Image (tube, grey):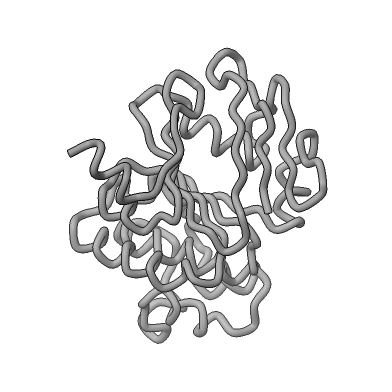
Amino acid sequence: MLKIDKVSYKGILKGVGFDVFDNELVVITGPNGSGKSTLAKCIMGINKISSGKILFGKKDISKESITERAKLGVSFAFQQPVKIKGVTVRDLLISAGTNKPEKYLKMVGLVPEEYLERELSNTLSGGELKRIEIASILARDAKLMIFDEPEAGIDLWSFNDLVDVFKKIKKDHTIIIISHQERIIKLADRVLVLENGQVSRECTADEFLEEVK
């Protein structure tokens, strides 16, 4: 699915390398400043890598634009979802490419009748916006979903809902999550630890959580 091959970026990332396989949930964790969010943005093309290669399937996407990567099936969710006044949840999901927006709201645990006509504004909580963003990624039929600290800015109840959504969708999707939250790490098929701009170790969720006890 994805191969990161000796990727460096402005002294922040230093020859990072790993693979992500189909229908795998990989959590990338590590101390603040280790380059986790930078790496996620490099995969999406928001940051242009200094050296190395990023392969998506068999295609080298190292120099491709964000738009081209999105067309190929790479998606990215920021820590804070975008609010767009005047744009409804229905508008967002239809623009993502579905004529059945109700289906994707149900997948993330939201009642369509209560949300389709609401604007993407401050009337929605952080947790609601996160779930709507995930619904839009699902509606785009993204082959690879990248989430940068999805727990940021939401309360405990919203976080619980978010974990439930990831549990539900992980079976049939390839997902990278940048996180240091134990409950998200527990969902991982593999954990990659990033330290000082390099992958310092790779392990199962149980192995990692045992190490940090």
**Residue 28 screen position, x and y as percent:** 44, 41
Work out whether residue 97 or residue 3 is closer to the camera in this orientation and state it. Answer: 3
Position of residue 67 relative to residue 187, above or below, is above
Residue ID at (44%, 66%) = 132
On the question of residue 79 being in view, the answer is no
Q: Is residue 54 left or right of residue 151?
A: right
98 is higher (above) or lower (below) than 142 = below
Foreground: 87 or 21? 21
Q: Identify the residue at image location x=58%, y=36%.
A: 41
Residue drawn at (62%, 34%) of the image: 42
- Is residue 210 visible in the rendered image? The answer is yes
- Above or below, comparing residue 64 to residue 171 in the picture: above
Q: What x and y, as percent, mark residue 112? A: 42, 83
* In this picture, residue 7 sits left or right of residue 29: right
Identify which residue is drawn at 64% across, 67% down: 140
Expressed as whole percent of the image width and height from the top left, the position of residue 196 reads 44, 18
Quadrant of the rendering where the C terminus is positioned: top left
Q: Position of residue 98 (x, y in %)?
A: 64, 77
Of 203 and 63, which appears nearest the observer? 203
Q: How many marks?
A: 0
Point out the image quarter for the N terminus: bottom right
Q: Nearer the viewer, residue 211 or 99?
A: 211
Residue 43: quarter of image:
top right
